Amino acid sequence: MSHVSYVSSASVKYRRCKSVVVLVLCILSAAAAFLAFYSKNAAGQRMLVISGEDKSKPILEIPVSPGSEFTVKYTHSQTGGPMEMHFAVDPGYKIVLTEIRAKVLRPEIEELTGYARTVVRHDGWTIYRDIGQKMDPLFLRVRVSPGEHSLVINGKEIPLLSIAGAGDRLQFRVK
């Protein structure tokens, strides 16, 4: 005599229901993990956003936090000497001019750095430190001559002409 096993329709429905419940729980768990990760990063991570004058769309976004530093390097249009403007992100996520380095002095540089508490001369550079002037947003016009602007952040130097055109006005802001 052969043994035939019958599976009731209630048993099949139970197994299907159990599979669907397990699948839904897996999807919900994955979604919860994604949302937890995203909300942690969205709440804790700010970006240095560089946009064009129309501000319609960011050109470049770089993660920053309080204390992050970046430098804008260029050649001064009148003196032909190298210039560096050093910035930091303050605890309120504002851009602050912290230091200016110049190879050639000009009266307007002295005027601009009236906020400096410390002036140091080193290897032909005049370094204005402890400026602490908020520049948020920071605006910068990109130029080609006599020396191209570049942004130095996180150990990388980015020529601004690689992200914008000559004459474009860029806005730097932390968001």
Image (spheres, grey):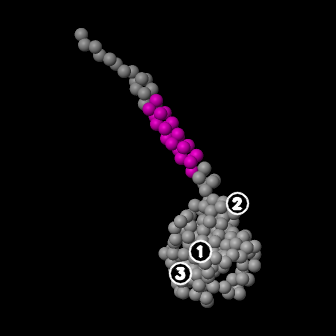
**Residue depicted at x 66% and y 85%:** 105
Q: Residue furthest top?
A: 1
Rounded to the nearest angstrom, the CA distance separating label 3 from label 2 is 31 Å
> Tag on residue 43?
none
The residue sitting at 71% across, 76% down in the picture is: 119
108 versus 96 height, above or below: below
Question: Looking at the picture, does residue 90 appear above or below residue 171?
Answer: above
How far apart marks 1 and 3 lie (CA) works out to 10 Å
> Is there CB contact under 8 Å for labels 1 and 3?
no
Crowd tier of the residue under label 3, counting other residues whose Cα lies within 10 Å: few below 14, some 14–19, many 20 or above: some
**Residue for badge 2:** 91
**Residue shown at the point (40%, 24%) measured from the top left:** 9
At label 1, counting other C-alpha atoms closer than 10 Å, the crowd grade (few under 14, some 14-19, many 20 or more) is many
**Residue 127, percent from left and from top:** 66, 76
| Res. 148 mark | 3
Q: Are marks 1 and 2 in contact (CB under 8 Å)?
A: no
- Residue type at tag 1: Val
Q: Position of residue 64 (x, y in %)?
A: 60, 61
Q: Image point 65% across, 61% down: which residue?
A: 67
Q: Which residues are magenta?
A: 18-38
Which circle marks residue 72 in the picture?
Answer: 1
User: Could you tell me if residue 60 is visible in this image?
Assistant: yes
Q: Amino acid at mark 2?
A: Pro
Decide whether residue 168 is among the magenta residues: no
The number of callouts visible is 3
Work out whether mark 1 precedes mark 3 in sequence or the reverse, and give the earlier one.
1
Mark 2: secondary structure? loop
Q: Is residue 131 left or right of residue 151?
A: right
Relative height, residue 128 to residue 64 (above, below): below
> Magenta span has 31?
yes
Outermost residue to the bottom: 78
Which image quarter is the C terminus in?
bottom right
